[in-house]
Image (cartoon, rainbow, N blue to C red):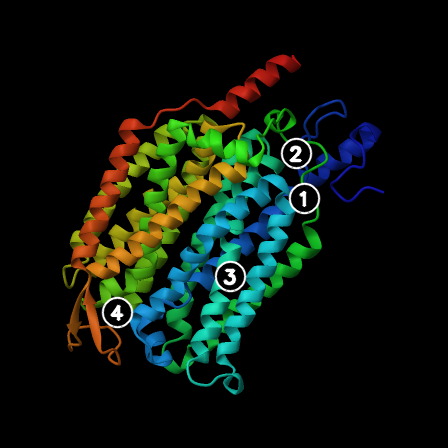
Amino acid sequence: MAEPGIPADPEDRSPADESAEEVATGEPCQSAASPVRLYQKRWFILVVVCFLNCSNATLWISFAPVADLTASYMKCSLDIVNYLSLVYLLVSIPMGFVASWLLDTLGLNYAIVLSSWLNMAGSIVRSLSAVQILNSGRSTLVYLFVGQSICALAQPLVLFVPAKLAAVWFPEHQRATANMIASMSNPFGILLANIMSPVIASRAEYIPILHGVYGVPAVLVCILATAGVNERAPLTPPSLSAVNSTSEPFFAGLKQLMKNKAYIILMICFGCGLGIFTAFSTFLEQILCFNGYSDFISGLCGALFIVFGSVGALLCGLYVDRTKKFTEVVKICFALTALSVIAFAVASNVKHVAPLLVVICSLLGLFGFAIYPIAMELAVECSYPVGEGSSTGLAFISGQVQGLIFMVGFQSLTKPYAVSHLSSCGMDQIEIYDWSIPTLVMAGICSAGACIFIIFFHTDYKRLKAEMAAEEHEE
């Protein structure tokens, strides 16, 4: 007996079976002789990946929007609180190579289920820091950092999955949109954390509540993934490129990527953008509080940064699905993102311009996040037939490495100041920091990355060409 939505053998299906599937899926079903077929279960797997991505992101960034209150509650410095985010980058860099291998060698279902268990385990260990009977001295910080490290092991698997999911389960005309939805669930988790953390932890003593609020979804999504994601791939592929896939072995694929000039440029420039956005999301509250902007304004800027980013990614994803203009869209968005970062660097160092900052952060998200899913599809297109896990994985590892460098470098460029009544930063802190120099450096790096990509990146769409050749062969 076949699973719902998964036929035991395409050739055993009757016309009535195919008519029933068309009604169930709302999509035309290919004939039994067709080399491609669509399955309704792809939407369930997409939902699970979205929830998992969102949960992992909230666990990563949960303390950043209330960094000052967290430092007060934990009786530690802001640097220690920043390390709770930084540990994700430290752990996920070596884990990224494992995640790429696992995706391309063992398959999508193993990556999803393993990441869901790691995500849940990390959230539980984090929660132990709020159990007073288990804590003495600095053990609270130990639980937090161990839990964050376990969650960080899940992050590469979670981030690398969308492109693989789109290629394995979705047809050519839905790939960019599916990738966009799955990819943008990660910044949506950051959005939730930026909104919920300041609301829940309005006072330092409420910090422990964050563990339960962000831990419950991690448990629920682990149950969904374990129970429902059990196929490596659909029985019949959804596209001709999947039918005729000649994906290279993992290590051979890595060698090909390192010889691919277009991919190397994309990997470096995308990694630069991802690293800048990681630092921006982590330090936004600290950047703004020095000039008197409250946690509410910081949270609003962070929230609109991601809301408009989701809109930009959606619009560009739909446009690219129809036109296949991957390169043109990414180049335009890179240029507009660089301009937005320059505007933020200037405006964030001026007092009493909250409405302007809100607009700039919205534009930064609108253009910046649009790059994210489309660049992942572009990485696959310019490196085909290298596996999706390898091509997207190396690009993300580049982003994690650069993000780590930027976060450490930007912190070292800050200037310490004694707490004054003009600042909205936590008054229990010994000192606060002036971020004027790091924001200008951030703008310069982003502008350089955009210029390099716009001038030097050129590529053929190899996967699309393979599909066109396969269609001609079928005819």
Between marks 1 and 3, how big is the CA–CA gap?
27 Å
- For residue 34, side relative to residue 167 (left or right): right
Label 1 packing within 10 angstroms: few (<14), some (14-19), many (20+): some
Name the quadrant of the N terminus.
top right
Closer to us: mark 1 or mark 3? 3
Labelled pair 1, 2 in contact (Cβ < 8 Å): no
Looking at the picture, how far across and down is residue 104, in whole percent?
A: 59, 39
The residue tagged with tag 3: helix, strand or loop? helix
The residue tagged with tag 4: helix, strand or loop? loop
Closer to us: mark 2 or mark 4? 4
The residue tagged with tag 1: helix, strand or loop? helix
Mark closest to the chain's N terminus, 1 or 4:
1
Q: Which residue is mark 4?
A: 294
Looking at the picture, how far across and down is residue 167, in whole percent?
A: 57, 35
Closer to us: mark 3 or mark 4? 3
Mark closest to the chain's N terminus, 2 or 4:
2
- For residue 3, side relative to residue 114 (left or right): right
Q: Which residue is mark 1?
A: 41
Q: Which residue is mark 2?
A: 27
Does 33 appear above or below 26? above
Between marks 1 and 4, how big is the CA–CA gap?
45 Å
Camera-side residue of 453 and 217: 453
Between marks 3 and 2, how big is the CA–CA gap?
37 Å
Badge number at residue 151: 3
Mark closest to the chain's N terminus, 3 or 2:
2
Closer to us: mark 1 or mark 2? 1
Camera-side residue of 74 and 372: 74
